[in-house]
Image (tube, helix red, strand yellow):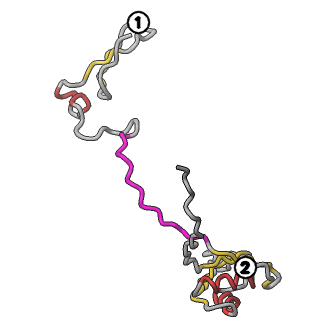
Amino acid sequence: MPKTAAPKTAAAPAKSYNTRLFVGNVPFGIDAEKLADLFDAHGIVIQAQVPTDPATGKAIGYGFVTMATEAHCKAAIAALNGTKVDERKIEVRFADVKVKKPPRAKPARRAPARGAPPAGPLPAHLRPDADRLGLAQPIVSRPTSAARSFVVEKRRLGPAPRRV
């Protein structure tokens, strides 16, 4: 029996409630109030933002406008994208929707860096009173050139090295 394809129905597009617009190439002398006035003719403006440089207080050159509906946004994009405002051609488009990422898991505990003191109590041969307790280990170094004898010293920095 041949398989018949199910009738194709046009799926309704997913509703996107993105009502925030990005406005690029904004003149540096414009503030949020002037930006809201510019978009007010094309729909209800809920909020207008023009980020400023914290050091100078001047506009950075872009802004965001939040409008009441997506239809108002589309009307504003159609009317204002590419128009000149104070001799600058502005770009108007839907702002990218930021997706909040879940917080990262804390990384696993790492081993201490080389040369760092060990975690926990010190081994017996590294204790400050190792000499008094007789726990320091003798270390035999290479013979000196003058005496050709071995120099023995007490060292608290770790286990005795192997003889070569």
**Span of residues in magenta:** 96-112
Residue occupying the far top of the picture: 148
Residue 36 position (above or below residue 132): below
- Sequence-wise first label, 1 or 2: 2
- Residue 125 vs residue 157: left or right? left
- The secondary element bearing badge 1 is classed as loop
Q: Residue at x 60, y 70 (%)?
A: 10
Residue occupying the far right of the picture: 87
Q: Position of residue 142 (x, y in %)?
A: 40, 12
Kindly report which numbered mark, 1 or 2, lies closer to the viewer in this rendering: 2
Residue occupied by mark 2: 26
Three-letter residue code for mark 2: Val
Q: How crowded is mark 2: few (under 14 residues within 10 Å), some or many (20 or more)?
A: many
- Whether 145 is among the magenta residues is no
Residue 88 is tagged as none
| Pointers 1 and 2 in contact (C-beta within 8 Å) | no
Q: Position of residue 80 (x, y in %)?
A: 75, 83
Question: What's the distance in space between the residues labelled 1 and 2, CA to CA?
Answer: 83 Å
- Residue 34 vs residue 4: left or right? right
Q: Where is residue 67 in the image (x, y as percent from the top left)?
A: 60, 86
Q: Residue at x 57, y 58 (%)?
A: 5
The picture quadrant where one finds residue 145 is top left
Residue 56 position (above or below residue 39): above
- Residue 94 vs residue 120: left or right? right
The picture quadrant where one finds residue 81 is bottom right
Q: Is residue 137 or residue 109 the one in the foreground?
A: 109
Q: Which residue is drawn at 54% across and 68% down?
A: 98
Residue occupied by mark 1: 148
Q: Position of residue 118 (x, y in %)?
A: 30, 38
Magenta stretch secondary structure, dominant? loop
Three-letter residue code for mark 1: Arg
Quadrant that contains the C terminus: top left
